[in-house]
Image (tube, rainbow, N blue to C red):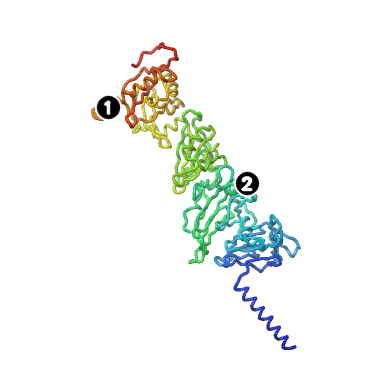
Amino acid sequence: MDCTCTTLVLYSTIWSLFFFFSTDSSPVDLLRVNQTIRDGDTIVSANHEFELGFFSPGSSTKRYLGMWFKKKSPGTTVWVANRDAPLNDTSGILMIGNRAVSIFDNATSTIIWSSNFSIFVRNPVAQLLDTGNLVVRDIEEEGDSEHFVWQSFDYIGDTILLGMKLGVDFVRGVEWEHVSWRSADDPSPGSFVHRVDIHGYPQLLLWKNSEVHARSGPWVGKRFSGDPLVKTSTIYINEFFIEQKEIYYKSRVLNQSSTTVATRLILTPNGNLQRLVWNDHKQEWTNYVNAVLGDCDNYGFCGPFSTCDISVAPRCACLRGFSPNRLEKWEAGDWTDGCVHTAPLDCGHGEGFTKYSGVKLPDTRESWYSLSMNLEECRSKCLKNCSCTAYSNTNVEGGGSGCLLWFGGLMDITGFTEYGQDIYVRVPASLSVANATGNFFRDNKIGEGGFGPVYKGSLENGQLIAVKRLSENSKQGLDEFKNEVSLIAKLQHRNLVSLLGYCTEEGERILIYEFMPNKSLDSFIFDKEKSKLADWRKLYDIINGVARGLLYLHQDSKLRIIHRDLKASNVLLDDEMNPKISDFGMARSFGGSQTEANTTRVVGT
């Protein structure tokens, strides 16, 4: 009998020692239905990356169920379960059931936090992964290890880990939000929320309570248009997905086989975003990016239709063609009312766009987008819609693609040098033309006639134009201007110059034509050097082209037109020396059966 007892005691002791050492060498990362975690107990992920248990943050005595780094930076918290419902003592117990993972307060016999599964799970098991994700799956579903009925990655706190998503899952009705702590001692939700806004073209917004505090700008391919947190990294890559079922942003490791990379994005209690990377050599977190917000990061600091530049004083400036909405407030340093159009827009009458490079794109909540259109299609669509105030590409990679249109005020534009994007802002025709000609710079002047000076210009899409500007002492007046617009706009022929647009704003009278690089015929006839370039064959082709143009005017066009001012200086030559008849200010139109008309002016040929 004594021998038997001794054997049993020895046998029991051996098994106890075996269990102790095997548990110590192989951390338990699972929690099953018949198991619990009490305060003081933990579970550890397979490779010791993360640990889950109860803790007290900072100087607080409250107890929370949380997750922290185990191998790197031990004790650095990355997730809290019961952030709204702390325990007052060490009586908390974590347990798993068929419908939820729950925290039970043993002191009050109440459940203070519960995960709530969407379905009944026959044999649930909770597992702490090396990614920092606490997941629950049905252990009976052997073939689908990635099918989670619940995961902590769906409930982000103040820390975003690699693999976490920030955005919206439309199928499950889940919104992934980045929510700050109230303080270093209190993990309850603070004043700041970082989320993907899906109204219009998706963008990242940082909210302070119920107001937008700051903005990253929309995603433009590998980065947000104004977010310094997305600078090029050899460690991780940022991605943004716009899909039917999901819209989300996430970061992932560049080397998928790497298990040594640790990085986290923190939203601090005062609203700053910090990207931290673990330095194994120094055994500390390196501040990779610390986005402390400045004046230009504060949403609406300069108001609509203005830009903010932190490097200059004053910080705010109206866009070209705009002026302060309230001048007295603007001059006093209060720019929040922004700017308004200096001259009203006249939709469909030669309006254009001013290009701005290197900016954070404006708020996209009042926008429309297409990922398949090109920039020229985008411009055309904006121009046809009188409510469209600006356009841009959605993606800057590969020369640019996609279309983004804005409607309403352009809010929160910031100047950047490294991360900026191009945007084209709608402006009146006069300003568009002024921009195209360098504000009628004298070096762009290519000629002068009875109407006024002619300037060479370039539109924002690169198209070259010729701009005729009515001068105050012009021999031709408003009647000739109207006559040219009304006639040439109705005519289309390869030997007639094309009128691209016109402008009648604030005393300006401007005609915009296709640019003729070889200027007018008289320069080839009367210039000794140029006349050598035009042989008889070329001159014959020019004469023939002019004749075809006249035949169209006199006989083949819908309106019978008599030019009345045809001369060598009014025959323009394109890059292939094809002639085009121009200057219809003196022209007269006839009805189909008319053979004569009266005039009070004797001019022309």
Residue type beneath disc 1: Arg
Quarter of the C terminus within the rendering = top left
| Horizontal arrangement in the rendering, residue 113 relative to residue 294 (left or right) | right
Which of the numbered marks, if any, corresponds to residue 487?
none
- Res. 467 visible in picture: yes
| Horizontal arrangement in the rendering, residue 587 relative to residue 306 (left or right) | left
State which tag comes first along the sequence, 2 or 1: 2
Percent of width and height locating residue 265: 55, 56
Residue type beneath disc 2: Ser
Q: CA distance from mark 2 to mark 1?
A: 76 Å
Q: Can you tell which quarter of the image residue 127 is in?
A: bottom right
- Res. 334 visible in picture: no
- Residue sitting at the far right: 109
Q: Residue at x 55, y 40 (%)?
A: 368
Question: Which residue in the protein does label 2 denote?
Answer: 210
| Horizontal arrangement in the rendering, residue 110 relative to residue 145 (left or right) | right
Quarter of the N terminus within the rendering = bottom right
Q: Residue at x 53, y 55 (%)?
A: 251
> Tag 1, which secondary structure?
helix
Percent of width and height locating residue 143: 62, 61
In-front residue for pair 9/77: 9
Which of the numbered marks, if any, corresponds to residue 537?
1
In-front residue for pair 331/271: 271
In-front residue for pair 520/217: 520
Figure check: 491 above or below 180: above
